[in-house]
Image (spheres, coloured by chain):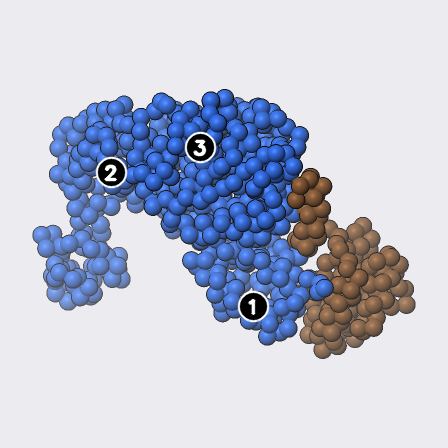
Chain colours: A blue, B brown
Amino acid sequence: MQYIRSHVLICAGTGCTASGAKKVETALREELAKRGLEKEIKIVETGCHGFCEAGPLVIVYPEGTFYVRVKEEDVPELVESHLYKGRIVERLLYREPVTHASVPNYKDLSFYKKQQRMVLANCGHINPEIIGDYIANGGYEALAKALTSMSRTDVVNEVKKSGLRGRGGGGFPTGMKWEFTQKAAGDKKYVVCNADEGDPGAFMDRSVLEGDPHRVIEGMAICGYAIGAEEGYVYVRAEYPLAIKRLRIAIEQAEELGLLGDNIFNSGFNFRLKIKEGAGAFVCGEETALLASIEGKRGMPRPRPPFPAISGLWGKPTNINNVETLANIPQIIVKGAEWYAGIGTEKSKGTKVFALTGRINHTGLAEVPMGISMREIIFDIGGGIPGGKKFKAVQIGGPSGGCLPEELLDLPVDYDSLIAVGAMMGSGGLVVMDETTCMVDLAKFFLTFTQAESCGKCTPCREGTMRMLEILNRITEGNGRDGDIELLEEMSRNIKTTALCGLGQTAPNPVLSTLRYFRHEYEAHIHDKRCPAGACSALTGYSVTELCKGCGLCKKACPVEAISGEVKGRHNINQETCVKCGACIAKCPFKAIIKG
Amino acid sequence: MKTIEDLKRMREKFQAENNLRQAGGIEVIVGMGTCGIAAGAREVMSAILEEIARRNLQNVTVRQTGCIGMCEQEVLVDVVRPGEPRITYGKVTADGVKKIIGEHVVNGRIIEEMVVGKIAD
């Protein structure tokens, strides 16, 4: 046996893989072999740490040194200096954006200080392709406890008492859902995990499946026991190949150890899991459309009731939960409902994972207790807005959610306070916007998405989103008319109340919430033919100010020859021919060209 | 796997493999400055790892450190047992390693004749 003196953890999540983690790993293996250190130092591939902005991430134990943006070329120095001589490589440490102080240790990063990582506890710390790493951290103890010492009803009651609510968007109490399915009449029942995460900017579920797949499997098995199901499906989109691969490995390993299969823990309970790959239709995140897709039909929703708890997959009682919801289950069973209910707010218990994207310094994943303020998430954890720009709004809940302006940043983040201000928790995607984002353009972006993803079954969604999008298009092109705002509001109300499923019912939300907080931007577009953020190209012009020295660089840069002027004389832009590409503004050394 | 005891056994087995990622336990620190390396620190390090593996010791982490200034005493090896002062041994050779591990790390007996320094917290 060889004694391993050091573990080098390399993040192999999708984010770090994209920024070159695999190359770093290969270089590291070669370099260790060259120095004869390969037997005393172990390389561990982990899932996502959440700090995707600074990837590829490398952590060296026993010191716990946290290296960021490690490149292939850095590897020889890392091995020579740290792994051979034990000297930390200062230049690869993370530096706080405000203080510029270097932070050698993982746990001291401001990004992690305000987080409470429970669902993500193992992500980045274990190898998701080795079941032993999960077991070493207490994995499958919850399943063992439930099967050997709790009745089915005990399990349902424990989840009910914990106050856990669905993390996929709706926020329905999970325990109640389980109880409905448990009590539904039927000889065969199913557990389905909804991993069809499709909101722009959301990647929480992907990271959990990639970084800690056994946690979801364990949650599903416990659910199967509680409701009386022996079969489960994970519906995961085909665009998540790494998540699917790791999930397959995890299922195989759990079967080998008898943690899935027949007579688990000698309890007489049998449970098996299958993976169903979705083809990437957003509407398949809606539960009835998802079930139709598993059955091999076209992914379209159907009216409810009957709810899946009564008549779901192949007409049998079916319990559908989101990835993050199921990943919460094991800790509730092990530590108890009371412990869980002690975290969060009165009506929103536990933690929530958010994906931070857009104009924010620390793009990545953060898990925080419910009730924390949006300001803390964006500024303390997320590190604020890059480039010295001013915060404008944050979109929460993706295309079904709404935006929160600056004055609502101190609002506690929980299900009910978000609904009250016209947004929603959604699945947890946060898109941060700065002063250069046009809110009409933002509404247009999300509506373009829902319009394209509408399955076409019901008229309000199919036709309504199309017509609303036409209006938004003409507003941003400078052809907005009097009455457009009122028409948008009326259509929004009608679609919300008449669309068949959640996709259509929530599609107008981005329009309504931007109208609620940024109505003046719509009015400026329609009445003044002006885009206050300077983002809508049809409403933005470029002009040359008196700072112009007549160097002629802009004239050369202009692709359509719209700029005229003599050397050393002030230049001029012909607004008729200008295509508003911005090439001139980028070239001007005197900041003499302005946009607006 | 059929019982909770099976699961517990498996948990302990896998935990042992990942012990060094947890804080705590006994630390053995090798001086790997230029002076240390010139005096044979790398061979000493290898001998330490072999000895730990041979004895199948758990809960021991091996780290390196830079030059502390006593270059003529290299190779320097420190042993820190939780709650006890940091003991520095000087002129350690591969042979001395067996003694340090066997006496001090395993049994807590300081080998006074090899000690060149003590640092209490």
Horizontally, is A262 left or right of A486 in the view?
right
C-alpha distance separating marks 2 and 3: 26 Å
C-alpha distance separating marks 2 and 1: 48 Å
Res A335 → quadrant: top right
Q: Residue furthest right?
A: B113
Quarter containing the N terminus of chain A: bottom right
**Element assignment for label 1:** helix
| Residue under numbered circle 1 | A29
Three-letter amino acid code of the residue under disc 3: Ile
**Element assignment for label 3:** strand
| Residue under numbered circle 3 | A320
Three-letter amino acid code of the residue under disc 2: Gln
C-alpha distance separating marks 1 and 3: 43 Å
Tag in front: 1 or 3: 3
Chain containing the residue with disc 1: A
Residue A587 x/y as whole percent: 25, 62
Q: In the image, what residue occupies the spot 17% across and 49% down?
A: A541
Residue A122 position (above or below residue A188): below
Q: Residues within 10 Å of mark 1 (few under 14, many from 20)?
A: some
Residue A188 x/y as whole percent: 47, 30
| Residue under numbered circle 2 | A451
Which of the two labelled residues, at mark 2 and mark 3, occupies the earlier sequence position? 3
Horizontally, is B13 left or right of A484 in the view?
right
Q: Residue furthest front?
A: A187
Which is more toward the observer, A456 or A205? A456
Which of the two labelled residues, at mark 1 and mark 3, occupies the earlier sequence position? 1
Q: Which mark is residue A422?
A: none
**Element assignment for label 2:** helix
